[in-house]
Amino acid sequence: MGDRAAFSALVREHQRSVFFLALRLSRGDEQLARDVAQKTFLQAWARRASFRGESSYKTWLLRITSNLCSNELRRAWRQRELVPQAPDGAPAELGRTDPTSDADLDEQARRQALRDAVHALPDRQRRVAILRLYEDLAFGEIADVLGITANNAKVSFHHAVKKLRAALEPTVEAP
Amino acid sequence: MSRVVSLFRPGGPPMSCPPDPLLLLHDAGELPADIAEGWTEASLRDHVGACRRCRRVLAGWQRSIDSYRALDPIDPGSFDDAFFEDLAREVDEALGRSPAPVVPLRRRPAIPPMAWAAAAVLVLALALGRLLPSEGVPVADVGESPDLAVEPVAAVEAPPASAEEALRIEAQALGRSWLDDALEEELPVADEAQAMAASAADVYPFATSLYDELDELSRDELASLFTQL
């Protein structure tokens, strides 16, 4: 039971990172992200003996999350279970209230443009960008999560931001 | 000096400036040694300190990154502590359940022992139905002594031959369909959890349908077959 108690503490420490990464990779599919988060911890528990401490627990968990997300999204794509769409075709907003002013509308439009641009990136660049921008991981940690080299992560991030700038100017880019 | 030549291109940075990707990677933290083209962290830092153009490039890069971070499509604040408490509890409960057996990813569904027993009884009944005489047969016909005068024995409530044949055909078809269901179906399962769920979902209706069919037959048609046992 000591193991279980320690693992429960681990779950509570990292569940936000795990859930938000799954939510971002799934483009806001909350149910899928929740399922992936749960499966991540169950898989981590089942494979705890294989954790050798070569990376941090966090990057190990995020690696499982990233892989599970890929599997779930592939399965969802095969089953044509696409992300819930708002009536205008945009993905449903993620826990945000309806816009009430022009400024809100403008921010939502820019947010939507950024989301579309991020998801238009090649898969590796998209994952690197999400991990760097929103999980604030170092390139070495991103490399651990994605199973690539740190240099590869840096170059992917550079290409990702370059493409985002090209796609979003002047929608998102600050003047 | 080959480095300087390789960097020059129309509209690009001046010959003395590092290429933008190198500049941006330097700004992001570590400079990848294998693509540094002779630049070092220190020489880049010195160059940026002295070059207005490179500072402008870096400022624009940082502005972009900041704006992307500020426009995070996820609003973490909309998922409160209660949401995560709930999630942690779900994980705890799932961990607390007894470990399920590992199920092969592609497997034939398990068949309940009672289903095998019922199928075996049916097959035995069919086999005996073929071997046993279905109508009255004189004992002499089966090789007894001619000294004994025995009256032909009438079969007790034997069904007509055509009905028996129809019953056998029906029973064989039923048996085939059971075996098809049990042995030929493979479920396209992708992971262990799905396999376990599929297994439970698959075996139950199979067993149920088997017993339903047996009940159905035992009421009418199979009654005469089993009397021959």
Image (spheres, rainbow, N blue to C red):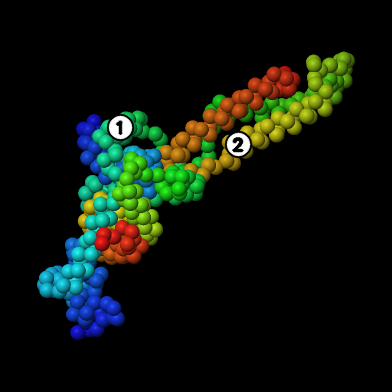
Q: Is residue A61 above or below residue B224?
A: below
Tell me, yes or no, if residue A76 can be seen here: no
Tell me, yes or no, if residue B151 can be seen here: yes
The front one of B198 and B179 is B198
| Residue appearing at x 65%, y 24% in the figure | B214
Amino acid on which disc 1 is placed: Asp
Residue B86 has which mark?
1
As drawn, is A13 to the left or to the right of B203? left
Q: Position of residue A128 (x, y in %)?
A: 30, 57
Q: Position of residue B185 (x, y in %)?
A: 57, 41
- Mark 1 or mark 2: name the one nearer the start of the chain: 1
Amino acid on which disc 2 is placed: Asp
Chain that bears disc 2 = B
Is circle 1 on the same chain as circle 2? yes
Which image quadrant for residue B122?
Answer: top right
As drawn, is A55 to the left or to the right of B182? left
The front one of B199 and B111 is B199
| Residue appearing at x 12%, y 74% in the figure | B50
Determine the secondary structure under disc 1: helix
Q: Is residue B157 above or below residue B203?
A: above
Q: Residues within 10 Å of mark 1 (few under 14, many from 20)?
A: few
| Residue appearing at x 86%, y 17% in the figure | B152
Which residue has dot 2 on it? B181
Query: What's the distance in space between the residues labelled 1 and 2, CA to CA?
Result: 41 Å
Q: Quadrant of the N terminus of chain B?
A: bottom left
Which image quadrant for residue A94?
Answer: top left
Q: Position of residue B219 (x, y in %)?
A: 69, 18
Determine the secondary structure under disc 2: helix
